[in-house]
Image (cartoon, rainbow, N blue to C red):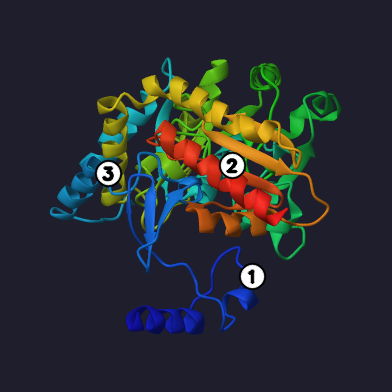
């Protein structure tokens, strides 16, 4: 106990947490929850208490914590080399992973893989590719990005400028890319497509918007519109990728393969920071003329340990038949959520695969209080305002998903 108290004192003295009101956090009476170990869907705190990981550790964990296959792959890689520069060098894990990533999509359209560190940088890479492509290939007037109302594409300066949620822009000033935002497919009729370099969208469901679900067929319509207007289509599958929606990627529900796709979060199974931006041979070829280098990258691009983890995660998908088992798990999850669909305090339950947003009817901001109360019932998750988010790891059993729902229901009832 003395060790924990010492660490917490240092924590309050020196650390600054993202998306966290620090005045309350640093208050003398507040004891931060310190997560010290995990196994499968379960996390343990400094006192040995156990919690179900109800949001997959901020939407990253896929196969559970401390999975032996991924742990072994990382350990094996560390015995050779942990990291070397990818600027002018290469290495086997990056090559092997690139091949496996492009093979996740039908046909031979997405053939090139650009690595980075996280979702925001994967988005930045894709948007910069699109803008530079048109500039150096005879269409410099295509300098605008089209995004959608209430979108969220990351926190770096350029990525934040794409989003439609002002709270994530921080300064409140205009910055970043030239952006046009629309709320629906119908609004595209008013857009000058000749100025557009790329359209970006979170397919199937918008995360930070409160788990808002797009109409079925909308992505296919958008692809058709982009093709007709020679506009690149970029998909942000940072949240939805790697099985979250019931298929490996959300776009595959509508048989859409985009021109650019950004993936991160679950790419390593939730173990190490890594991201990838996949694109077409057409776009890649636009950078092959002398002087057309893509001047973008990061120190830890294609980190070997991260690539090893990602390869191991893809192996787990095969060995444990994860995708084949998902339809049954999605149905089990949906049945468990039925208790909220008839709850008088719930406005709407929005579900895509193993992603759920449970919107509470309240004029007050109660979402954070409900999620805090859920800890007393053994559940960890975070809301989006008054939308309670449940996103279990894909390895969650029917019993674990039911326990997550029960804990959230008890917390809801205790607060309201």
Residue 327 lies, in percent from the top left, at 46, 20
Residue at 58% x, 74% y is: 25
Please say whether residue 2 is visible from this viewpoint.
Answer: yes
Residue 97 lies, in percent from the top left, at 30, 35
Q: Which residue is mark 2?
A: 127
Asked if the residue at tag 1 contacts the one at tag 3, i.e. Cβ–Cβ closer than 8 Å, the answer is no
Please say whether residue 289 is visible from this viewpoint.
Answer: no
* Residue placed furthest toward the right: 190
Residue 38 lies, in percent from the top left, at 33, 54
Q: Which residue is mark 1?
A: 21
Which is nearer the N-term, disc 2 or disc 3? 3
As rendered, which of 327 and 171 lies closer to the eye?
327
Q: Residues within 10 Å of mark 3 (few under 14, many from 20)?
A: some
**Number of numbered callouts drawn:** 3
Report how far apart the C-alphas of labels 2 and 3 lie in the structure: 34 Å
- Left/right placement of residue 261 relative to residue 95 reads right
> What is the quadrant of residue 342 in the picture?
top right
Residue at 41% x, 18% y is: 108
Which is nearer the N-term, disc 2 or disc 1? 1
Task: Tell us which disc is closer to us: 2 or 3.
Answer: 3
Report how far apart the C-alphas of labels 3 and 1 lie in the structure: 33 Å
Residue at 60% x, 63% y is: 19
Residue 343 lies, in percent from the top left, at 71, 37
Location of the N terminus by quadrant is: bottom left
Report how far apart the C-alphas of labels 2 and 1 lie in the structure: 32 Å
Q: Which residue is mark 3?
A: 67
As rendered, which of 159 and 219 lies closer to the eye?
219
């Amino acid at each position: 106990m003395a060790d924990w108290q010492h660490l917490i004192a240092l924590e309050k003295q020196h650390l600054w947490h993202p998306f966290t009101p620090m005045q309350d956090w640093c208050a003398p009476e507040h004891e931060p929850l310190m997560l010290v170990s995990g196994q499968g869907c379960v996390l343990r705190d400094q006192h040995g208490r156990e919690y179900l990981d109800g949001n997959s550790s901020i939407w990253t964990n896929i196969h559970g914590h401390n999975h032996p296959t991924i742990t072994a792959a990382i350990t094996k890689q560390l015995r050779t080399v942990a990291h070397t520069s990818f600027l002018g060098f290469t290495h086997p894990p990056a090559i092997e992973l690139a091949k496996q990533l492009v093979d996740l999509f039908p046909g031979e359209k997405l053939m090139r893989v650009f690595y980075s560190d996280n979702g925001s940088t994967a988005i930045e890479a894709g948007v910069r590719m699109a803008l530079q492509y048109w500039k150096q290939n005879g269409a410099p007037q295509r300098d605008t990005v089209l995004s959608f109302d209430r979108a969220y594409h990351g926190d770096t300066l350029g990525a934040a400028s794409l989003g439609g949620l002002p709270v994530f822009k921080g300064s409140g000033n205009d910055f970043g890319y030239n952006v046009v935002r629309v709320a629906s497919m119908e609004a595209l009729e008013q857009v000058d497509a000749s100025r557009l370099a790329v359209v970006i969208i979170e397919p199937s469901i918008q995360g930070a918007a409160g788990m808002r679900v797009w109409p079925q067929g909308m992505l296919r319509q958008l692809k058709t519109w982009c093709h007709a207007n020679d506009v690149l289509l970029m998909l942000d599958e940072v949240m939805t990728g790697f099985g979250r929606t019931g298929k490996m990627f959300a776009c595959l529900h509508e048989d859409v393969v985009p021109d650019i796709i950004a993936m991160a979060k679950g790419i390593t199974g939730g173990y190490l920071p890594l991201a990838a931006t996949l694109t077409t041979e057409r776009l890649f070829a636009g950078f092959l003329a002398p002087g057309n280098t893509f001047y973008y990258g990061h120190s830890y691009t294609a980190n070997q340990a991260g690539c090893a983890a990602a390869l191991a995660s893809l192996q787990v998908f095969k060995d444990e038949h994860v995708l084949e088992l998902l339809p049954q798990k999605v149905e089990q999850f949906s049945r468990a959520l039925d208790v909220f669909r008839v709850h008088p305090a719930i406005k709407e339950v929005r579900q895509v695969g193993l992603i759920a947003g449970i919107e509470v009817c309240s004029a007050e901001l109660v979402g954070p209080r409900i999620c805090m109360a859920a800890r007393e019932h053994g559940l960890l998750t975070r809301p989006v305002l008054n939308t309670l988010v449940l996103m279990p790891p894909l390895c969650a059993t029917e019993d674990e998903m039911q326990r997550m729902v029960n804990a959230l229901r008890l917390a809801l009832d205790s607060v309201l």
